[in-house]
Amino acid sequence: MSYMGYYFLPDAIESLNNHENDTEKHQADQEARETKEQQGAARAAALSGDIELILALSPTQFEYAMAVVLQMLGMTDLQRVGGRGHLSVNITGRDASGRTVLVQCKRRARTKKIGSPEIEKFIGMAHLHHHADLKLFVTTSEFTEHVRVLASQHGIQLMNGSDIENLARKQRESTP
């Protein structure tokens, strides 16, 4: 009698596989919808240039918003790579000349300046691991003077909250 059960085993395995595939597809569709929603909110915040609105975004939305800001600067092939194990890089892309760009994003209140440990980590990973042509550190706050000097010495470009606001304002003024 148990021998007959083997005839049903392939059907049972196929049924389990189909269920797993349906579950994975549903999860992928859900993640795609959530990503699209996050990108929409991020785009609106970035185009507004309102730092308070940008600060209210989730960390992922903030990275998407900064990708929109980078698009305003003419960068292309932008990909959000943030999350666990991102090795100090949240966004990769190319500038108008086709050079590779690495971007580290830090969402901070204006009163919390970016200090040496954060820029030192970015410098190390950007130079030793990623080997990109251009390196950009973006924050909604400001940088300490020491960070500005250190970044300059290592070819790191800096963008602060005021830069983000000004860029969004110029974008709005140039759009008919």
Image (cartoon, helix red, strand yellow):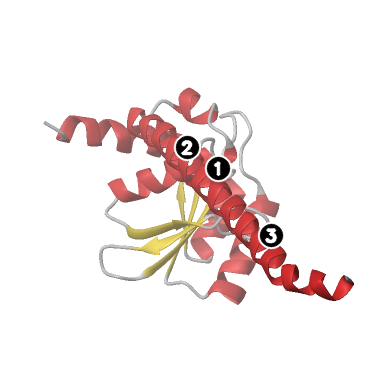
| Percent coordinates x, y for residue 169 in the rendering | 28, 30
Q: Say whether disc 2 or disc 1 marks the residue closer to the N-terminus.
A: 2
**Helix, strand or loop under label 1:** helix
Q: Are marks 2 and 1 in contact (CB under 8 Å)?
A: yes
Left or right: residue 174 versus residue 65 is left
Quarter of the picture containing the C terminus is top left
**Residue 126 — which label?**
none
| Percent coordinates x, y for residue 39 in the rendering | 42, 40
Kind of residue at badge 1: Thr
The reply to whether residue 160 is visible in this rendering is: no
**Residue 16 — which label?**
3
Q: Residue at x 43, y 41 (%)?
A: 36
User: Number of callouts in the render?
Assistant: 3
**Residue 60 — which label?**
1
Q: Are marks 3 and 1 in contact (CB under 8 Å)?
A: no
Q: Identify the residue at the far front of this view.
A: 1
Judged by depth in the image, the label closer to the viewer, 2 or 1, is 2
Which residue was labeled with disc 2?
Answer: 38
Would you place residue 54 above or below residue 8 in this image?
above
In the image, 28 versus 128, the foreground residue is: 28
